[in-house]
């Protein structure tokens, strides 16, 4: 597969200056970085392509050779600016990050990186449907790492300070030359920090943090849904030796309700309806999610499955003053445990009424059955 033009890869004109090249590179490198696209082979390929293009175009000698000879400048037999050959990723990913973030770190030579940011934490919390409707202020207890209160996160005993690592000279990296390539590795002496602690804090053993259980007050807003994730910035594990803390992610699980079923912002409720009320009509009272009662007018002849809509009686909508609707579905209940008198009354009703008038659905169904099977026996 033929290589793409380096200027095309970065999306710049051939006359672009160094600042334009750097801006284009930073944008694309962040977009296709493997940490942002885990498992995406195409993004990884583009990330390497972007770095290869910028490695050439940022260097005046390489750029001049590329402008004159194209990709052939760095292939076998082609000119090699500077006599050292094409270095590619000679500095590894550390050079990439230096290029991307060096300006923000104050410039200068690359020193040891700061200790790692604290880990993010996950906390699973179960709430009721009523709490999801109204919102909730809750306290949670989270086992985590917090900044050591003896050394204030420094990791060293009071009165002492970390010193530059003698192995790497404070750079946090060690380099070895192998032919045309320079291999850079994290310093084994300091773990890439660039500093070592000669007198570690006895309380945290030099880590700058301790294991403790932390109590947090969290606000569950009204209208949250099952699976909602709430981020509590800076409430994760404390970083090593004063590094920034991670975040805490609260994952919500909503308990099933014995009466209501939720679909987005709407609520559904199935209510049994007495046969007499369904036949003659009337009114019933149903509960609502806020703990009140609502009256539903039932017309005469109501059948099982009919729904009645109560506007604005559903769930709260997250970050909105509006509410969903409530749908009441009735199920006509057949009488059981009849007394002799009740049975007599029903038999009298059956004799006095025509099936086709009082039960049109049943009459219509069996008429259709007889049309399909004319020889159907009674």
Image: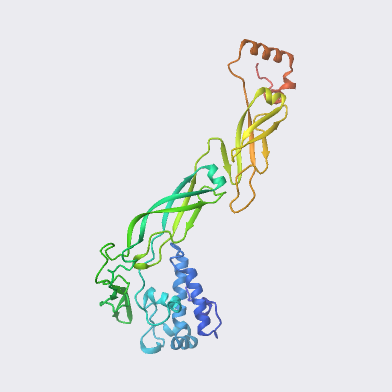
308 in relation to 282, above or below? below
Residue 128 horizontal side relative to residue 342, left or right: left
Residue at the spot 35% in from the left edge and 78% down from the top edge = 111
In-front residue for pair 153/303? 153
Q: Residue at x 57, y 39 (%)?
A: 261
Q: Quarter of the image containing the C terminus?
A: top right
The total of numbered circles placed on residues is: 0
On screen, 347 above or below 136? above
The answer to whether residue 154 is seen in the rendering is yes
**Quarter occupied by residue 40:** bottom left
Q: Position of residue 344 (x, y in %)?
A: 66, 11
Q: Viewed as shown, does residue 29 lie left or right of 186?
A: right
Q: Position of residue 141 (x, y in %)?
A: 40, 51
Pinpoint residue 130: horizontal percent, then vertical percent. Answer: 55, 42
Please, is residue 34 above or below residue 378 in the view? below
The location of residue 375, given as percent across then percent down, is 67, 19
Eyeballing the image, is 95 above or below 239?
A: below
């Amino acid at each position: 597969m033929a290589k793409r033009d380096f200027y095309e890869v970065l999306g710049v004109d051939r006359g672009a200056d160094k600042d334009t090249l750097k801006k284009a590179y930073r944008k694309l490198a962040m977009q296709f970085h493997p940490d942002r696209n885990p498992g995406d082979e195409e993004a990884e390929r583009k990330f390497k392509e972007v770095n290869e293009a910028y490695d050439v175009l940022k260097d005046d000698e390489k750029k001049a050779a590329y402008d004159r000879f194209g990709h052939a400048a760095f292939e076998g037999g082609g000119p090699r600016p500077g006599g050292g050959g094409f270095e590619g990723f000679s500095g590894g990913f550390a050079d990439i990050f230096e290029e991307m973030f060096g300006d923000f770190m104050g410039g200068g030579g690359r020193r040891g990186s700061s200790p790692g940011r604290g880990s993010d934490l996950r906390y699973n919390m179960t709430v009721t449907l009523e709490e999801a409707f109204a919102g909730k202020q809750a306290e949670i207890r989270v086992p985590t790492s917090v900044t050591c209160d003896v050394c204030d996160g420094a990791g060293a005993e009071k009165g002492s300070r970390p010193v530059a690592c003698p192995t790497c000279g404070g750079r946090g990296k060690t380099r070895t030359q192998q032919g045309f390539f320079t291999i850079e590795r994290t310093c084994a002496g300091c773990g890439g920090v660039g500093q070592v602690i000669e007198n570690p804090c006895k309380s945290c053993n030099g880590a700058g943090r301790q294991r403790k259980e932390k109590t947090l007050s969290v606000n569950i807003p009204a209208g949250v849904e099952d699976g909602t994730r709430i981020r509590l910035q800076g409430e994760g594990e404390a970083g090593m030796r004063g590094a920034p803390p991670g975040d805490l992610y609260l994952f919500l699980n909503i308990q099933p309700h014995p009466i209501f079923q939720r679909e987005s912002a709407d609520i559904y409720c199935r209510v049994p309806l007495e046969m007499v009320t369904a036949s003659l009509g009337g009114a019933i009272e149903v509960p609502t999610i806020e703990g009140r009662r609502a009256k539903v007018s039932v017309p005469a002849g109501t059948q099982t499955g009919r729904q009645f809509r109560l506007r604005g009686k559903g769930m709260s909508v997250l970050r909105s003053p509006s509410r969903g609707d409530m749908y009441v579905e009735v199920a006509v209940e057949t009488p059981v445990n009849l007394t002799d008198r009740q049975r007599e009354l029903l038999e009298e009703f059956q004799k006095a009424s025509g099936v086709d008038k009082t039960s049109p659905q049943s009459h219509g169904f069996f008429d259709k059955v007889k049309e399909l099977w004319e020889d159907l026996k009674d």
